[in-house]
Amino acid sequence: MQNWPEFEAHWLAPYAMRGSLSKGRKHPEEPHPFRTVYQRDRERIVHCTAFRRMVGKTQVLVGRINDHHRSRLTHTLEVAQISRTAARRLRLNEDLTEAIALSHDVGHPPFGHAGEQALAACLKDHGGFDHNLYGLRRVDLLENRYPEFPGLNLSWELREAFVQHAKRRDDPAVREFWEVGSPLLEAQLVDAADSLAYGAHDTDDALGIGLITLQDLAGVPLWRETATPVLDKYPHLTPSGIRTAVIRDLIAKLVLDLILETERRLTANRIASVADVRAFPGALVGFSPKFVEQSAELGRFLRERVYRHHRVVRMAEKGKVVLTRLFTEIVANPDLLPDRHLRRVAAPEPTLERVVADYLAGMTDRYAREEHARLFHPEAES
Ligand code: MG
């Protein structure tokens, strides 16, 4: 095999996306002599500002509790790793899968879902806020890395992956992506890997900082069934040893189930091309019914015991206050906005409200808190 298209033709499953079939980029570019279209996408994501800022953005637990619970960035790397493992086994396009995984959370504002709720409330009468659409705007317009065009000029398929969960399907920014049918298998895979990863690592982090105990988890079937063989095999493990071993086995078990169930659905539905994937109305990538149910039970447990834990709620509420106050103050007094942001405001859009939300959504947790202190604590340096 001399070149990549030949390798793709030889290796990839018939339902995998091929770089040669890409709808391309908005601003045409010469093909790279040896990097594929999705390889370039992946590398553009890794080099962009929004990617690096994910190190300072909350996943679930706001920073400063300890130095090793997950941030958006480490969550993203775990999702990429899980997605690639499954993509290789399913012979999907690994470069595209990895690019989708690495970019899937770049649109999240600071302070996790609380931050998104705060911005959505601020923009209630100004078009709303959705991290998926913000992610797309971020890579299409707000990243500033090339003299030739705004944004990162990513491939159509990577841009499409941003909006598969966008709630507002009527938004003109996303309409073109709905017309092609169901998401590619690579995008569906990242979606499943994302939920697998956060279920496992939110449990891990919550144990690590003491929001829950191993005894609490004994009532959760997915945990119990995974933990029992570990405890039988290693009866003298410490609690932290149990935690690490069970989390590892849990991820391995779910990844295997995801691969097998996906293979089963692809075969049962006679999926033999990307066109078949596009035309199939439901999810082709997913977990078997047993694990869908067990993961949902773990999810309910996490919602009650972790996401609604007073320490988590307090951090989230503080984050909301920070963003809401910043938004209100800057909209009332636009001169507080750095020039390069203020210059973006134009009639009929983007409106001042949108530009301020774009500015705030790009911040890390730390930067937003410092900006809040600069504006509202008279003793802080401005
Ligand atoms: Mg995610």
Image (tube, rainbow, N blue to C red):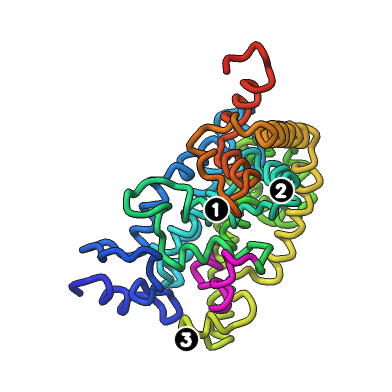
Please tell me the numbered disc located at residue 123.
2
Q: Residue furthest front?
A: 347
As for residue 271 lying within the magenta part, the answer is no
Which mark is in front, 1 or 3? 1
Residue 324 percent across, percent down from the top left: 72, 36
Disc 1 marks a residue whose amino acid type is Gly
- The image quadrant that residue 261 belongs to is bottom right
Q: In 3D space, how far apart are the residues under numbered discs 3 and 2 (Cα atoms)?
A: 44 Å
The residue labelled by disc 1 is 135
Mark 2 packing: few (<14 Cα in 10 Å), some, or many (20+)?
some
* Tag 1 near tag 2, CB within 8 Å: no
Disc 3 marks a residue whose amino acid type is Ala
Q: In 3D space, how far apart are the residues under numbered discs 1 and 2 (Cα atoms)?
A: 16 Å
- Image height of 16 relative to 77, above or below: below
Earlier residue among tags 1 and 3: 1
The residues colored magenta run 171-190
Earlier residue among tags 1 and 2: 2
Mark 1 packing: few (<14 Cα in 10 Å), some, or many (20+)?
many
Mark 3 packing: few (<14 Cα in 10 Å), some, or many (20+)?
some
Q: Nearer the viewer, residue 5 or 87?
A: 5
Q: Nearer the viewer, residue 126 or 280?
A: 126
Please tell me the numbered disc located at residue 272.
3
Q: Residue furthest bottom?
A: 270
| Kind of element beneath mark 2 | loop
Q: Residue furthest top?
A: 379
Identify the residue shown where x is 54% and y is 60%.
Answer: 162
Residue 273 percent across, percent down from the top left: 46, 84
Identify the residue shown where x is 26% and y is 70%.
Answer: 4
